[in-house]
Structure formats: C-alpha cells, structure tokens
Image (cartoon, coloured by chain):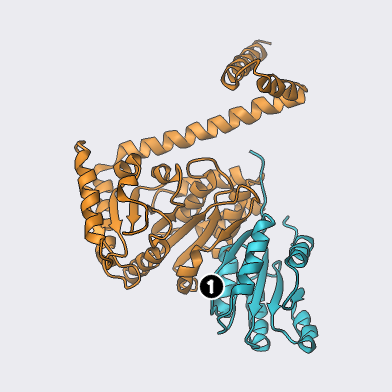
C-alpha cells in the first residue's frame, strides 16, 4: 500500500493521527493532496456541516464549546475547524480558538483543528473545505466551522456549511444594522449571545425588524435565539434548532444550496487549473515577464490578456488534436 | 497554486502557574516570524498538550513553565509524545528551569531551554534551524 493509501485507510478508520496528517497535506497542497482528496471524496456527505460566523467578541468559541458538549451528551462525534486570520505582513498567525475549547481536547469523540486563512483573498479557503471533507470521511457526525467574522468570508460560509449560524452580542460597538445584507439572507439561525446583558432584547428586536424588510418567502423561517455561552443557557434549544434544520434539509433535499456548493467548487478548481496551466506555459516560453510588463504599462488590461491567452490555448489544443 | 508549508508551533503551559506573559511574547514573536502558533491557555495537562499536538500536527512544541514542576511534568509529556508516535516533533522549553536541571531535560529529548530574558530572536532562529524536515 502506498503512503497515500495508508493515510486514506487511516482517515476512513477515524485514526486521529491520519486525520491530522491528511489535513496538513491538503493545507500545504503537496503533490499527494489531489490524490488524497479524490480517494476520500466518495466517503463524504454524511456529516451535518454547521458554519458559525460573527464578529470578534461575540463569544463564538465559548458557544461552540457548549454546543460540542451538548452534541457529545447526545452521543454524536464532532469535528471543529477554527479559522483565524493570517497576518498579511508576516505570513504568520496566532491561533487561539482552542483556549476556550481545551477541556474537549482529550475527548476522543471530538477533533479540533485550528487553521489560518493563509491570506486566501475573500471567501473560504479551499483548504478549509477540504479539511471538512476529511473530517466527514473520518466519520464525524457533526462538523462545525468557525470563521473569521470579517470580510467576505462571512457570506462565503454558505459554500461550505449546510446550516449557517450567525452570532452576535449586544454592545459590541458593531450595530446590528451593520450586519451585511448578505449575511442576513443566508443565516439559518441567528443567535444573540451574552443575552444576560441589558440590550439583548433590543438586539433581538433589531434583527427582527431587519428580517421583516426581507420579503422573500422562505420555506425555513430563520429563528432568533438567545444564549449565554458562559453558563450554557439556551444551548440545548440551539442544538435542537440545529437538529431541526438538519431534518428540514433532508426533507427538502435542499438542492439549491448543494448545487451552488458543487458549482462553486468546480468553478474554482477549473479557474485554478486553467490559470496554472496557461501561466506555466507562458513562463516556459519566456513570455510571462513581458506580459506582466505590458499590463503594468497599461498596454493591455488583465481581463483582455486573459481572453487572448485563453483563445490561443484553445487554438493550440485544436491544432494538436488535428496533427 | 504552489504548495506553502508553514511551520506550526504549539505554545503550551503545563502545570498550575498562571503567568503567561512570557509564553504570549514568544507566541507573538514566532507569529511575526511567519509561523502558525497555536496557544492553548493556562493549566494544561500533559495529556491535553500531547493530544493538541497530535490534532494540530505541529512541528514544534514550546513548553512554558514557571512553577518548578518541570521535573514532574516534562518526562510525562515526552513519554506521551513517544506513545502517540509524535517522535518527530521538536520540543523546547522556557521559563524557570534551574541550570542544574538542564542536562536532565536535554536527556529527555528537549532540544533547547531558554531562560528568562532570552531574546526572542534567539528562539526564532533556534526554531528555524531545528524544525524537523517533513518527507
């Protein structure tokens, strides 16, 4: 058995070292990575993937710890992917989400992995999606993805999660009204955490009033729940709602979201492949620098350059097929 | 896209002391040197530390201890690392570790010991030079 095959067997058996090693491989995008993903992909699709997003200070990690405990009480196994930003200046990252979850680290039914965004511009990094696939193939019933509550990644969470939970807390200075419209629309469950604070009820009402502006008829009515993550208050109701949504998804077979996810992953893979192939060729021909210079001198814009390169590639492929 | 390997470091505080300023200073320094640093907070047991190192597939572990319990805790940690097959992780330590204990700690497999006042640059260089290769 090759090393990759051994690793795949380990992941499918739920071996923790294999899971950890597999995630590192896809994160570093080594030569093994595509083979690894191809091998485990058929074994994915069983887990309930929950995305949790919200501003810093809203209590995401503390809440996740309580959610995981509740799921464990119900006998489910859980994977957690906690994402933190990579510094654009140093390329390093401080991954501190585990601080709030450390008591869970020795529970064999829980696997927690901290990941840095590695400067993936806007959206959920492919590595995060692949880490979810690995945990899925490894047999985790529930996978929770905690994302950086900033930039596009908030709304992009829909590309990896089946259930999106948006968490907020009163008095963060981030007014509820500042919640991006996109986030309002994709949330399946709203949570107002730190609900023991004074303005919690106002926060709930603010969310409700924004919801009412959204006239779309939805099959799932997005509930607004209150929690106090520190004490665990409201968490069992939250988990019940998560379960309800999962059942809703199964019944509705939620085709639209699944198709969206599949299309987005395919498109991304195509873009990457096309870009890499064409740029590599150009570099081999020694024409890459030249093209970059043309773009810098404003002789051609990037989109037109891409168009030209694309046509040339197709022409060549057609000629090759003929000869 | 080209593969990028980042050095992943676990900064852990075993034992019961609650002084983590030093640990955080080192954590931030390593982050500023381009590494991904997992910090797990105070009062970690050896079991928690090793399990974390396993799940996070770290290359390096930095143990920070100021309570004097290194002689009790470090052997346990090194033993657990061996048990779990994490023999290719580089371990260094910092905090209050008396000079006369250093040889014993090195024998356990702890590669570097950095006392109070060690410049962070020293620790960064040491880590970069001693991080194990990944095949």
Identify the residue at image location x=64%, y=31%: A276
In the image shown, does B123 or B62 lie closer to the viewer? B123
Identify the residue at image location x=31%, y=62%: A193
Which chain does cyan denote in the image?
B
Q: Is residue B34 above or below residue B80?
A: above
Q: Position of residue B85 (x, y in %)?
A: 65, 70
Chain A, colour shown:
orange
Q: Position of residue A181 (x, y in %)?
A: 32, 40
Q: Is residue A135 above or below residue A41?
A: below
Residue A158's image quarter?
A: top left
Left or right placement of residue A205 versus residue A135 in this view: left
Q: Is residue B75 above or below residue A171?
A: below
Task: Provide the secondary structure element on which disc 1 rests.
Answer: loop
- Which residue is tagged 1? B41
Left or right placement of residue A147 versus residue A254 in this view: right
The crowd level at tag 1 (other Cα within 10 Å; few <14, some 14-19, many 20+) is: many
């Amino acid at each position: 058995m090759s090393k990759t095959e051994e690793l795949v067997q380990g992941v499918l058996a739920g071996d923790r070292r294999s899971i950890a090693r597999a995630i590192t491989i896809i994160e570093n995008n080594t030569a093994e990575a595509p083979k690894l993903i191809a091998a485990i992909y058929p074994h994915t699709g069983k887990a309930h993937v929950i995305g949790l997003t919200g501003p810093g200070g809203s209590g995401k990690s503390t809440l996740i710890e309580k959610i995981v405990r509740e799921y464990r009480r119900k006998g489910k196994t859980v994977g957690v992917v906690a994402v933190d930003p990579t510094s654009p200046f140093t390329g390093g990252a401080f991954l501190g989400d585990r601080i709030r979850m450390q008591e869970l680290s020795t529970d064999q039914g829980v696997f927690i992995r901290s990941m840095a965004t590695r400067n993936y511009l806007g959206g959920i990094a492919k590595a995060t999606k692949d880490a979810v696939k690995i945990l899925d193939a490894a047999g985790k019933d529930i996978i929770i993805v905690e994302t950086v509550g900033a930039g596009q990644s908030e709304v992009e969470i829909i590309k990896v999660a089946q259930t999106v939970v948006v968490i907020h807390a009163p008095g963060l200075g981030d007014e509820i009204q500042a919640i991006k419209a996109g986030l309002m629309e994709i949330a399946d469950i709203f949570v107002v955490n730190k609900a023991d604070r004074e303005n919690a009820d106002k926060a709930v009402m603010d969310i409700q009033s924004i919801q009412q502006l959204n006239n779309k008829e939805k099959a799932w009515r997005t509930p607004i729940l209150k929690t106090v993550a520190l004490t665990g208050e409201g968490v069992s109701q939250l988990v019940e709602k998560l379960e309800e949504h999962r059942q809703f998804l199964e019944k509705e077979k939620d085709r639209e979201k699944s198709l969206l996810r599949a299309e987005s992953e395919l498109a991304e893979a195509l873009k990457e492949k096309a870009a890499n192939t064409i740029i590599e060729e150009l570099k081999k021909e020694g024409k890459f620098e030249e093209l970059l210079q043309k773009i810098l001198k404003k002789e051609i814009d990037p989109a037109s350059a891409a168009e030209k390169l694309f046509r040339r590639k197709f022409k060549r492929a057609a000629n090759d097929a003929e000869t | 896209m080209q593969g990028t390997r980042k050095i992943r470091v676990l900064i852990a505080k075993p034992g019961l002391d609650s002084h983590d300023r030093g640990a955080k200073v080192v954590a931030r320094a390593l982050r500023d040197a381009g590494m991904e640093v997992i910090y797990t907070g105070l009062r970690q047991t050896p079991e928690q530390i090793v399990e974390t190192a396993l799940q996070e597939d770290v290359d390096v572990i930095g143990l920070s201890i100021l309570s004097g319990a290194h002689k009790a805790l470090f052997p346990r940690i090194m033993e657990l690392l061996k048990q779990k097959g994490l023999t290719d992780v580089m371990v260094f330590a910092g905090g209050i570790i008396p000079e006369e204990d250093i040889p014993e700690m090195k024998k356990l497999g702890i590669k570097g010991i950095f006392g109070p006042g060690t410049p962070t640059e020293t620790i960064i260089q040491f880590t970069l030079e001693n991080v194990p290769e990944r095949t």
